Amino acid sequence: MKILGYGKTDKVDHLVTKEMLDRDSHRKLQKFLEDIEMAIFSANREVMKKAVPELTRESFMAFAVRVAEARARYLKIALELSAIAHPSAEDIARLKAAREANDELLHAFEATKRVIERGYTLLAR
């Protein structure tokens, strides 16, 4: 009998712990992982430098203000609609658009912050 969605595989993943490795293998693994991290760092720096050449303190702070404004718009609309017993479809669509704008700007801001924290780009003075 075959059960839909179930398949048997012979592959079994095993986690390799530090204790399972001898000293030389552990050192080689650590070196490999460090090399991978440096490759990722270098790739991100190179790509970010081309894509976002003018990231400054002023542009980052302006971005933060736009995110705050989007959040304020979203909350303002939500509070306005909370006073209406039966908001219209247009009202709900306006609220949804404000939420989506807030969410997208917030995600973009967090990604930008992460790029700075990881050193993929430096803030120009």
Image (cartoon, rainbow, N blue to C red):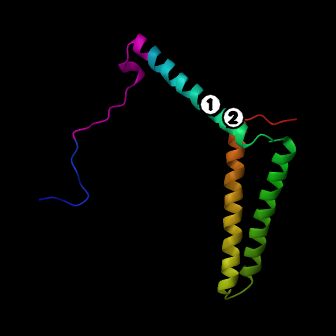
Q: CA distance from mark 1 to mark 2?
A: 7 Å
Q: Is residue 50 left or right of residue 41?
A: right
Residue 89, x across and y down, in percent: 65, 85
Q: Is residue 93 above or below residue 73?
A: below
Residue 101, x across and y down, in percent: 70, 64
Q: Is residue 97 above or below residue 60?
A: below
Near-viewer residue (83 or 54): 54
In this figure, which residue is indicated by the disc labeled 2? Answer: 120
Near-viewer residue (43 or 29): 43
Q: Are marks 1 and 2 in contact (CB under 8 Å)?
A: yes
For the point 50% across and 18% down, the residue is: 31
Near-viewer residue (59 or 8): 59
In this figure, which residue is indicated by the disc labeled 1? Answer: 41
Residue 83, x across and y down, in percent: 75, 83
**Quadrant of residue 29 within the rendered picture:** top left
Residue 34 among those drawn in magenta = no
For the point 27% across and 36% down, the residue is: 12
Q: Is residue 35 above or below residue 106?
A: above
Badge 1 marks a residue whose secondary structure is helix
Q: Is residue 88 above or below residue 121?
A: below
Badge 2 marks a residue whose secondary structure is loop
Residue 78, x across and y down, in percent: 73, 74
Q: Earlier in the sequence, mark 1 or mark 2?
A: 1
Residue range corresponding to the magenta coloring: 10-26
Q: Is residue 29 left or right of residue 95?
A: left
For the point 57% across and 27% down, the residue is: 39
For the point 22% across and 51% down, the residue is: 7
